[in-house]
Amino acid sequence: MKSKRLILAALLSTVIISACTADEGSGRGTIGEAYEATPTPAPTAEPTQAPAPTEEPVMPDIDLYGIMSEWDYEFSSGAGGWGTSLTVDPKGHFEGYYSDSEMGSTGPGYPGGTIYQCSFSGRFTDFEKVDDYIYNVTIGEIEYENTPGTNEIVDKVLYQYSEPYGLENTDKLTVFLPGCPFKNLPDGFVEWVDYCNFGASANGQYYRDHPEFLYFSGLYNPAEQYGFYSTGKAGKNHQYLINTAHLPGLKNVEAHIENDNTYYYVDEGYAALIDIENRCFKADDGADIYWKEEEFVDMCLKSTGHHPNKGSLSIFGKDYDQSSNFTKYAYINGNRSVLTFWTQGSNEDTGYYLGMFSQIPGSYNSTTDTVDPGYAYAYIIYFHPDQSPYTITALENYLTSLDFSGTPDRLSSASLDDIDEYASSYAYVTAGKDSDHINADLVELIEPEDIDKIDAYGLSEKDFEDQGWVIAGFDQDYTSYTLTDDCPMYANFSGNPFNPLLSHDEFRERLSADPDGGLMYLYFNKEGQIVFIHEVPF
């Protein structure tokens, strides 16, 4: 499944390039043999003995109701002010409330309008497993505070009592647990939860931004194709920020998950010239990325121990250019996020940082009429601009692969490949014989100060008049290269700003648009396989 994310404003490249002296890789390398990953061991077979008979039905080995009790469920379109809320306790008892109103629907005795309402409670009596993340539960009992179909006038408002919208015409619900692959969710569920999640506007259009894995618990009424999303209850973190693409060459050096599920991971690579910090922490009271953007960034920087040099901090969103074609904010699965750049230190010890800060607020507190600030997330890339193996564009693209997930399985960004050496090159790239190969003609970007290369390619000053640089060496002599299984492939001009990371097949389709090939930047491992690709944004 493709991944996506935020929009990185063109401003970012301008700010960073002006601060950095180079945006080049480490040169070309030799092309070698194909790499075969170590096969995954086959799972151990489960025992075949029948369980001893009991008075109660044998349940799957999971505390399903306990997991469900950690979430507050909501069925709503996000518009019109109507909704059904539902909570579950660890024993499988549930209670909820449905409400809708039509203040313009008046009549004799009720000039204040009409409210549709249902307070209900009940319990789930059993459940069955579909797979590790999907279960069916049975509604064994349900009771109503007021009989559906009745009504009364209270304080000049007509109360129409009904069944709870979302639970009608069924005694079965499907439960989707956090971490469920998004591709396994039924369309009916996705269509409903899309109303309140997974999207943002860009360039006058609304784009869906689905995660790879569900990052909350969901309820689904299959009879009516109604979907409930949920928010995690206060007390511990329930969502995890992951990168759906691995950055080749990184090794995990720190991994901490606390009792409240906050975490701190650090991956380091290439002679410590680049590292990635992935952190979740309790947001300060009053923290609000939607309304207090600068204060939120300041809170994140202090919480992660970063102290930007004076005047070096750029917050994208705050620095939005109304005349540009980019959105004001960055997003991760529809959650507003803030892209930042800063420097830290001085002279040869200056560090360069790209940061993505985000927030998922906690539950609404009806007693205080406030929303818990929830948890903040910081994903920070440190890099050395002159010696990092990755170009600025590569790191920008890598940040677009951030996802929220309901499980902490991929908090590390370290590569699945053991890569000790890098080679890189510009290339014109076309589709290969299958999805595991591409054809590439390696080329070089020549700038006016590259005297030796200008002489080698027979260039002159006139060649640099139009753009200030020249692509040299394009002779359409294509060579077939093998892609690693987890090679990230980014297409800047894919047509959807939230979906620059493409699958192998999607990337081949993108390449088919130009018979001469698209201009890409390639990274090779020491076996000569391609481990990372990004389209050159010229």
Image (cartoon, rainbow, N blue to C red):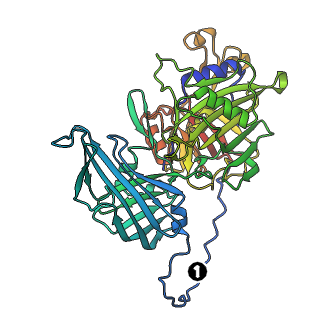
Q: Residue furthest left?
A: 108
The residue shown at (78%, 35%) is 273
Q: Which residue is mark 1?
A: 46
Q: Quadrant of the C terminus?
A: top right
| In front of the other: 386 or 465 | 386
Element at label 1: loop
Residue under the image location 51 percent in, 90 percent down: 53
Residue 187 in sight from this viewpoint: no
When the figure is inspected, residue 527 is found, relative to residue 426, above or below; the finding is: below
Nearest to the observer: residue 215 or residue 431? 215
For residue 107, what is the image quadrant?
A: top left
Q: Position of residue 348 (x, y in %)?
A: 84, 24
Residue 127 placement (x, y as % from top left): 44, 73
Left or right placement of residue 507 versus residue 374 in this view:
left
Image position of 405 (left or right of 105)? right
Residue 32 vs 473, above or below: the answer is: below
Q: Amino acid at mark 1?
A: Glu
Residue 293 seen in the figure: yes
| Residue 272, percent from left and from top | 80, 39
Q: Residues within 10 Å of mark 1 (few under 14, many from 20)?
A: few
Residue 522 percent location from the top left of the image: 62, 37
Q: Is residue 278 above or below residue 168?
A: above
Give the total number of marks visible in the rendering.
1
Comparing 18 with 105, the one in front is 105
Q: Nearer the viewer, residue 189 or 90?
A: 90
Name which residue lies at 47% across and 82% down.
57
Q: Where 102 sits versus 91, above or below?
A: above
Taking the spot 67% from the left edge, 44% from the top edge, the residue there is: 281
